[in-house]
Amino acid sequence: MNKVAKYLNEHLSGEVASQDFALSQVEVDNGLLARRPEMIVRAANMNDIRKVMRFCSQLAEKGHVLPVFVRGCGNDETGAATNKGIAIDEKTYMNRVIGIDPRQQLIHAQAGISLSAINATLSTHKGLGLPRTSYVAEEGTIGGAINTAPSGILSGAHGRFADAVQQLEIVLSNGDVIQTGRISRRELSKKKGLSTFEGEIYREIDNLISDNAELISQMDPALPDTVGYSGISRVKQRRVI
Ligand SMILES: Cc1cc2nc3c(=O)[nH]c(=O)nc-3n(C[C@H](O)[C@H](O)[C@H](O)COP(=O)(O)OP(=O)(O)OC[C@H]3O[C@@H](n4cnc5c(N)ncnc54)[C@H](O)[C@@H]3O)c2cc1C
């Protein structure tokens, strides 16, 4: 185990794996590209992920770049679930439903839970379930599905996956945590006034939207694209389509 892996193993509640056998399991996804990480961090909780991100951003400031990526089940075919550096695995320990509110049709889950496990929980309440897409593998994680924003021939009937997401808790590259969700104008101006990385993100996105207002107005917000470009036209819409 190298120095970084040893250090992280001592400081995380989860564990770090760097054996050849473990690394060979994550060096390809469902596609052809192969990239072997130096270690896999099996995060036990969000704090573990924060520590990894903070550690890597401090290393980067000193000129040593150690890439970090999340690995779900590796169903993707683009190579996006492979990289050098640190693979964060959330499916081993961060795979639970935190709560469910059937009245509001809300489920709160950790990112490493599989779509089939979420659907199994939802199926105990009449009429609830994840939007079905045509292709997405049921054993894939919710984190992977949200990241790839899947849609397919069933999306017209069941809605798009991205539209079913109400709120996300995100660990930023410097280890800060933000909660996303629809906010009022007043909340937006508060966020933009923050001197943190979160404030910078809100300011940059707001500028991007106002600098490109004409281009964005030509986009169809209902367009079922899976790359997220048309999503920018929904950011300031009153009601999500
Ligand atoms: C045959 C096939 C067809 C597909 N067709 C479509 C399609 O038509 N439309 C479509 O949109 N998708 C499609 N996909 C992709 C599909 O959405 C993903 O394969 C799957 O949902 C990802 O789940 P996973 O757990 O396997 O994620 P992985 O494959 O492990 O990861 C996918 C991506 O998500 C990122 N990721 C995973 N977890 C997290 C997390 N917690 N936080 C941040 N990022 C994360 C990874 O870094 C990677 O970039 C297809 C996949 C297959 C195998």
Image (spheres, rainbow, N blue to C red):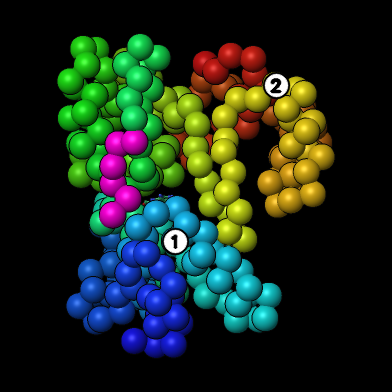
Q: Residue 59: image x %, image y %? A: 60, 77
For mark 1, does the 10 Å Cα neighbourhood hold few (<14), some (14 to 19), or many (20 or more) residues? many
Q: Quadrant of residue 84?
A: bottom left
In front: 145, or 78? 145
For the point 35% across and 58% down, the residue is: 44
Label 1 sits on a secondary structure element that is helix
**Measured from the top left, where is residue 154 in percent x and y?**
29, 22
**Image point 74% across, 30% down: which residue?**
188
The answer, for residue 155, to whether it is visible in the render is: no
Q: Quote the CA–CA distance across marks 2 and 1.
A: 32 Å
Q: Nearer the viewer, mark 2 or mark 1?
A: 1
- Callout 2, which amino acid? Ser
In the rendered structure, which disc, 2 or 1, sits on the residue that comes first in sequence? Answer: 1
Whether residue 95 is in magenta: the answer is yes
User: According to the image, label 2 marks what residue?
Assistant: 184
- Report x, y in % for residue 70: 41, 58
Which kind of residue does numbered mark 1 sit on? Asp
Q: Secondary structure at mark 2?
A: loop
Name the residue tied to disc 1: 48
Q: Which residues are magenta?
A: 93-98
78 or 140: which is nearer to us?
140
Q: Nearer the viewer, residue 176 or 166?
A: 176
Q: Residue at x 28, y 42 (%)?
A: 96
Q: Which mark is residue 73?
A: none
Vertical position of residue 25 compared to residue 236: above or below: below
